[in-house]
Structures are given as C-alpha cells and as structure tokens.
Image (spheres, rainbow, N blue to C red):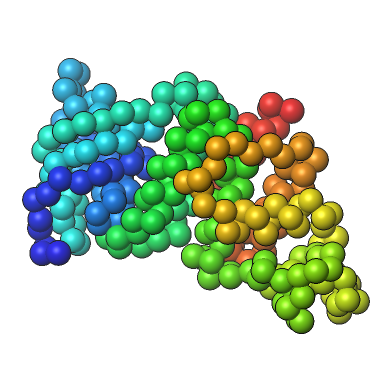
Amino acid sequence: MNSQTYMNFHGILLYRKNFKERDMLVKFLTAEVGKKMFFIRGARKRGFKMMPEILPFTYGLYSGKISRDNLSYIYSVLDTDHYENISQDIYLNAYSTYIMSLIDVAFPDSTPILGWFNKLFEALKLINNGIDAAIITNIIEIQLLNVFGVQPEFRGCTICGRNDLSMDYSEAYGGLICAKHYHMDPHRLHLDAKTVFYLRKFSVIDIQKINNINVNENTKRNLRNVLDKLYQDTVGINLKSKHFLDQMKDLKL
C-alpha cells in the first residue's frame, strides 16, 4: 500500500475517543488493512451528519483515505448497521468490549488480519443474536492465546502425545498432560473432565459454524477461572474492559 490510499473498506468500530474540542478519533478493525485510527473532524459538533455511522457497535462499508503510518480519514459512509442488542444491554456490551480490546492489543496496527476480522464479526453477531456471551468470549480468549505467543498444547498430552486418558492442564508443561504423567506436576490445575473437554473443543472450533452452545454454570465458572489464570500467568495484559466485565458479573451475581 502507498503512504496514502483512497479506498472503500469494511470496518468494525473498536472504540472512539474525543480529540480536542470538536473532533474525534475512531478506531476500526478493517477487513482490508487491519486496525486503523481515523480522524473525524467536527464529529462532536451538534448535528454532525455522520454520527449515527460511528456509534459504538457499528459495522459497515466506508470510503476514505487510508494512511500507512499516520491518521486516516473517512469521507463518506456507504452502508452501515449496528449490533442493536449489544448496544442496549450492559452485560453484552461489557463482553463485546472486552473481546474487541483483546483483539486490539493482540495485533499491531496496519497489519491485515482478515481471518480475525471475520471472527470478530461472527462473535459479535452471535452475542447480538442471543448466544451465550461468556462462552463466545471464552472461545476468542482461547484462540487468541496462540497470537499472544502462549501456544498451549490442547491436542494431547504434552509429554507423550496420548489423548485417550483423562487430562489435566499443566502450566509447567504448557498444556495438557495425561493421567499417566500427573505425578510430574504436583501443581497441575486439577480441572474436571468437562472443563478440559471445552478447552480442547474451543481451541479448534470454527466460530462461523456455531449455531448454539449450552454449557452448565459450573463448567462456565471453571472455564472463567482457568482462562483468568492463564492470561494472568502467561499473557500478562491488564485491560480496563476486563476489570469492568468482572465488576458487571459481580453485580449480576
């Protein structure tokens, strides 16, 4: 891509923030060029015509100037839609914002990631359509571990490769270990069989082929606990959206 390119692009709005007195910065994940920050002049002025097209949880087709190294610009909006249910529900909002924050920190700007654009689009669509937001979030978290460089082994035992015995997760060995080797890690996580099953399933599931997923509350809590531990111990990111999500869950309880 040249330093500046005029083009149409498909974008999912990740976040926006005020800039100076009347302007705004809006970050999109685009299908064509990855994550880009756009400068929108006059966005905070009363009656700004483009405001409905840059509301949170908006996606669509835009036209603008894409800059390789600097801020980009949106000149017109060709077609947009909104994840209405997400925007109107504080809990769905919290899960979706956390997913978008994770993807934002996982990849550098200006790097095409069409596969993850499609995953994000489908994840938000599923949440918007009533599929369990906590489980969709778990799937994204598990599949992002490889992007963050953790690369846990979920296919079989990290020591012998077997997958026909009961399994547990070992942080020391960076993945699952089978019952034959439990003695090699006294600090294994002692996960139950259902939690291990879903960790393995979610690591390879195609989110674009999901119609429905039902996971019992106990297993959902176990998945949340193990993923929090993995992210804390191996990824080490500290997102405001995660803290807010945790607060929302506590209030819901």
Rendered location of residue 112, percent (x, y): 30, 60
**Residue nearest the viewer, comparing 167 with 238:** 167
Name the residue: 26% across, 30% down: 80
In this view, the residue farthest toward the bottom is: 160
Q: Nearer the viewer, residue 165 or 182?
A: 165
Residue 201: which quarter of the image? Answer: bottom right
Q: Is 6 on the left-hand or right-hand side of 194?
A: left
Left or right position of 1 against 133 = left
Quadrant of the frame with the N terminus: bottom left
137 up-or-down from 110: above or below? above
Q: Is residue 240 above or below residue 56?
A: below
- The residue at the point 52 percent across, 52 percent down is 206
The mark total stands at: 0
Displayed quadrant of residue 113: bottom left
Observer able to see residue 194:
yes
Q: Position of residue 108 (x, y in %)?
A: 36, 62
Q: Is residue 227 left or right of residue 167?
A: left
The answer to whether residue 43 is seen in the rendering is no
Q: Residue at x 44, y 49 (%)?
A: 119
